[in-house]
Amino acid sequence: MSDNIIILMLGVSTFLGALGLWALLWGLKSGQFDDQSKFLDSARFDGDEDLRDAIMMEKKKKEALKRKQEQEKNYMPED
């Protein structure tokens, strides 16, 4: 590769990196990543029934994963 191409690639990558850093800092400064009510809403709207549903769904996922693993373990190809 010629030196001009390497210099061009370094310049473009440096520019794009600086642009990304500027966008991140701008987002932090302007509050784009702040969610003030996230934790308050989750505590306010999560009730006992919602938690029971979440636990039941987690159990179903684990049972389905166990069944799938057992089926894969007991799999025998046809002769």
Image (cartoon, rainbow, N blue to C red):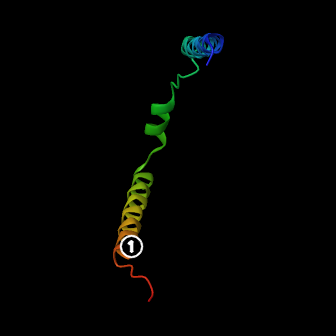
User: Residue at 37% across / 68% down in the picture?
Assistant: 63
**Compared to 43, does 73 lie above or below?**
below
Quarter of the view holding residue 49: bottom left
- Give the SS element for disc 1: helix
Residue 56, image x, y percentages: 40, 61
Indicate the position of residue 14 as horizontal and vertical percent values: 58, 12
Foreground pick, 30 / 69: 69
Identify which amino acid the numbered label 1 is placed on: Glu
Residue at image location 42% in from the left, 55% down from the top: 54
Tell me what residue is drawn at x 63 percent, y 14 percent. Answer: 2
In the rendered image, the residue lying farthest to the bottom is 79
- Between 36 and 3, the one lying in front of the other is 3
Q: Is residue 66 left or right of residue 49?
A: left
Q: Position of residue 58 (x, y in %)?
A: 39, 58
Location of residue 46 (image quadrant):
top left
Position above or below: 56 against 71: above
Examine the rendered structure and indicate whether residue 76 appears above or below residue 29. Answer: below
Quadrant position of the N terminus in the picture: top right
Q: How many marks?
A: 1
In the image, farthest residue toward the front:
2
For mark 1, what is the residue?
Answer: 72
Q: Quadrant of the C terminus?
A: bottom left
Report which quarter residue 30 is drawn in.
Answer: top right
Local crowd size for mark 1, using a 10 Å CA cut-off: few (<14), some (14–19), many (≥20): few
Could you tell me which residue is drawn at 45 percent across and 87 percent down?
A: 78
Residue 44 % position (x, y):
46, 38
